[in-house]
Image: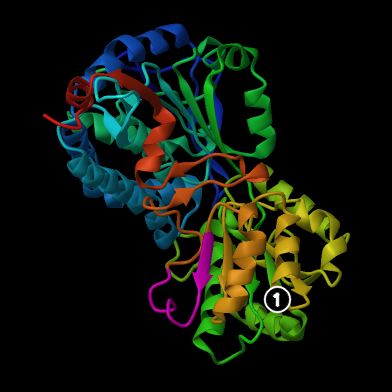
Amino acid sequence: MKTLRSYVLGNWHEATTGFIPLFDPATGQQIARASSDGVDFQAVLDFARTRGGPALRGMTFAERGAMLKALSRALKAHMDELLDLSRRNNGTTKGDGLFDVAGASGTLAYYAGLARGLGDRRAQPDGDGVQLARTEGFWGQHLWVSRRGVAVHINAFNFPAWGFAEKAACALLAGVPVITKPATSTALVTERCVEILLEAGVLPEGALQMVCGRTGDLLDRLGPQDVVAFTGSADTARALRANPGIAAANTRFNVEADSLNAAVLAPGVGPGSATWDLFVRDVVREMTQKAGQKCTAVRRILVPTSSLDGSVGALSEALGNVVTGNPADPSVTMGPLVNSSQLEDAEAGVRELTETASVVHGTGERIVGAGDGYYFGPTLLRADDPHNAGRVHDREVFGPVATLLPYDGDAADAADLVALGGGTLVTSLYGDDPDWLEAFLTQGAEATGRIYIGSEGSAGDAPGSGVALPQSLHGGPGRAGGGEELGGLVGLRLYQQRIAVQGERSLVERLTGVSD
């Protein structure tokens, strides 16, 4: 059985006690174990601050970008191996594994490309300078500089490759060393990713460390220049934010949490149209990709009352074509949930949803007869009183589960229902009427981090609302965590400090890189 190691202080650390088991979700068999016992977390922080930080800050953006490009190529070269690990530890089909692993390599490559435009600078000017006095003898220029701390990344189980890489790409390009903490249950993939990146030989010592297992007193020891970026449940985020050390030091803390994302069908969209077909295809994919274990998955489906019965039929038919089983079988299109606790939570969640909704497709229970894996089929519910649907707007079932909700066709009514979710990462709109779409944006855009519009014009190119592209913001208000990741250069801001430099114009411009 494989024992996962932590990479700290420039070496691989293998614990001898305190192990947490990892399982193959398709069979229920233990395949590895992990523990961080024996790791000196103060030493880990010191190593990043004194070795990794200075080395990264000494590099130009162009040099950091070349480093990221090499890391992207290294992951791409080991794609097949990582996909096999993803299947064994995550229960993913090949397509779902690519969504994670190729996404990791692609995000690193994207930020490598951004670095070329930043050139040989080590800091970024922000906007134009401004005259602050009667003459140019007193001038001001805003500047983004690297923070002198450590980026602690705590990632969720569902994207052990992409979740690690998308955070690391931004921090490393910003010049901040990374301590990554993958979710233990799927850390097999992350451990191998880190091993591959270290073998590439381009990372400065101390730029990247990894903790497999518990974080011990790591968070208690963070300071004012450090950053925590967390992805996971809202409940865990609240507990971490309450850490006395983080509060006392005012450590920067970014959260991307669970989200009751909504797909909204606009009035006038009917069967036979390209927009209708896109709506059905997208919703089914976003319900079932990675067995619905995505923070961007569709949880609520809003349709005009007149389209409710047709939507039930079309979605049920499409979900009926999903083949759930062991992803080692090429005929399988959806694998299992990641572990037994997620399976139990999904069953409990559907029971809660049925207090105000009824199941119209699936069973909401474990699939019997599919082996010892954690198999849970696609489940579609319907709530006919959407404004009084209770837990439908509050309980996220982290699996292939969504609820249909009728609305009166008015954009304001749809916006009100979306807002009942308390804040989403993404809301997808399907329609071709610009007036209706504009009305929704005016009345409901503030409740989400991203609006994905599916229309006849986008049907051939739209990748699905669940794709978090590095060019666009990933994050959302309220329940979704209130954080911001990716979004091009916006992703670097978490790891940078914005300062104002003031003085004589020519000197300020030279110091800030505005002029040579």
Is residue 400 in sight in this rendering? no
Magenta-colored span = 451-462
Quadrant of the rendering where the N terminus is positioned: top left
Number of other residues with Cα within 10 Å of mark 1, as a class: few under 14, some 14 to 19, many 20 or more: many
Q: Which x, y percent locates residue 366?
A: 70, 58
Task: Find the residue positioned furthest to the bottom.
Answer: 272
* Residue 188 coordinates in the image, percent (x, y): 42, 37
Residue 270: tell me if it is visible. yes
**Who's the residue at 62% across and 63% down the image?**
442
Query: Which of the pair 247/123 is nearer the observer?
Result: 123
User: For numbered disc 1, what is the local secondary structure?
Assistant: strand
Judged by its main secondary structure, the magenta piece is loop
How far across and down, in percent of the image, does residue 481 sit? 61, 40
Apparent side of residue 137 relative to residue 177 in the rendered image (left or right)? left
Pick whichever, 75 or 455, lies toward us: 455
Q: Residue at x 57, y 57 (%)?
A: 426
Seen from this angle, which residue lies furthest front? Answer: 134
Is residue 246 one of those drawn in magenta?
Answer: no
Where the C terminus falls, by quadrant? top left
Q: Position of residue 353 (x, y in %)?
A: 81, 58
In the rendered image, which residue does mark 1 sit on? Answer: 303
Point 50% across, 21% down: residue: 35
Image label count: 1
Give the residue displayed 38% in from the left and 33% down from the top: 191
Taking the image as shown, residue 27 lies to the left or right of residue 201, namely right
Residue type marked 1: Val
